Amino acid sequence: MRKLAIIISFLVLLAFLLGLYFYPQMPKKMATHWNQFGEADGYAQKFSGTFLIPFISLIILILYFLIPKIDPLKNNLIKFIKYYDLFFLIFFLFLIALQFFIYLWNLNIKINPNRFFPIGLGGLFIYTGILLKNAQRNWFVGIRTPWTLSSDDVWQKTHLLGSKLFIIAGIISFLGFFFFQYSYLFILIPVLTFAFILVIYSYFLYQKENK
C-alpha cells in the first residue's frame, strides 16, 4: 500500500476515535450547519452529529481506494497518483479540522465559521489547482466535460487554465478571512464563475480542434 494511503486510512480511523472521545461531552442536539452570517441553522441528534464527519470520511475513503481500480483510464490516473494521494490527504485533514470545529462549537468554544471556512477551503482550492496541472485524462478526477474527455489536447489546455484559476480562487477565498461578513461570497463566486468559464473554454477548444 502507498505510504500516503496508509496515512489517509489512519486519519479516517482517527476521526472515529475522536468521535468516541467527544461523544459523552456532546449535547443531545448538536449544531452541524451554519448560514452565511455565521449563525447555526442546522442541527442533528447527538449520535449523528458526533459521527457525521467520521462516516462521511469512511465513504470517501472507500471511493479513494476504488477510483484507481475502476477508472477505464486508470493507467493515466496512475501517472499522477502522488498528486491524487496528496489531494485526499489534504481533504481528510480539512475534514478532521471541521470535525474539531463542530465539537468545539458544541462545547461552547465558538470559532467564527466565516473565518474557518475561507482558510480551509482556500487551501483546498489552491491544492486543487496544483492537482489539475498534473492530472491526466481520466473519468473521475479533474474537469470532466464531454470535450475534455474526448481529447487529450483539450484536457491538457483546459486543466492548465483550470490550475491557474483555482489557485486564484484559493487566494480570493483567503481574503474572506478578513471580510468575514461576506466570506461566503469570496468562496462561492470565484469557484462558480471559474467552473463555468472552464466548461465553456473546453467546448470552444474542442470545436476549434475539430474544424
Image (cartoon, rainbow, N blue to C red):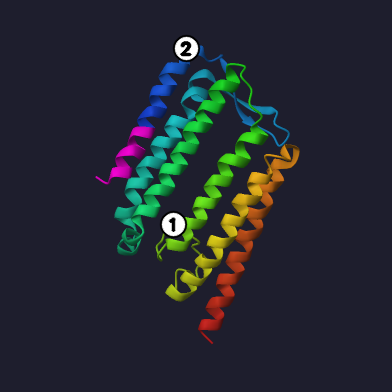
- Residue furthest left as drawn: 1
Name the side, left or right, on which 100 lies relative to 176: left
Give the amino acid type for the residue marked by disc 1 in the picture: Val
Q: Earlier in the sequence, mark 1 or mark 2?
A: 2
Give the amino acid type for the residue marked by disc 2 in the picture: Pro
**Cα separation between marks 1 and 2:** 38 Å
The image quarter in which residue 8 lies: top left
The image quarter in which residue 178 lies: top right
- The number of numbered badges drawn on the structure is 2
Q: Which residue is mark 2?
A: 24
Q: What residue do we see at 39% from left, 36% from top? A: 58
Q: Which mark is residue 33?
A: none
- Residue furthest top as drawn: 24
Q: Is residue 127 visible?
A: yes
Secondary structure predominantly adopted by residues drawn in magenta: helix
The image quadrant where one finds the N terminus is: top left
For the magenta stretch, what is the residue range? 1-11
Percent x, y for residue 110?
64, 22
The image quadrant where one finds the C terminus is: bottom right
Percent x, y for residue 198?
59, 65
Percent x, y for residue 195?
60, 59
Percent x, y for residue 114?
67, 35
SS assignment at label 1: loop
Q: Is residue 30 visible?
A: no
SS assignment at label 2: helix
Q: What residue do we see at 64% from left, 47% from top? A: 173
Q: Which mark is residue 141?
A: 1
Q: What residue do we see at 42% from left, 45% from top? A: 88
Q: Are marks 1 and 2 in contact (CB under 8 Å)?
A: no
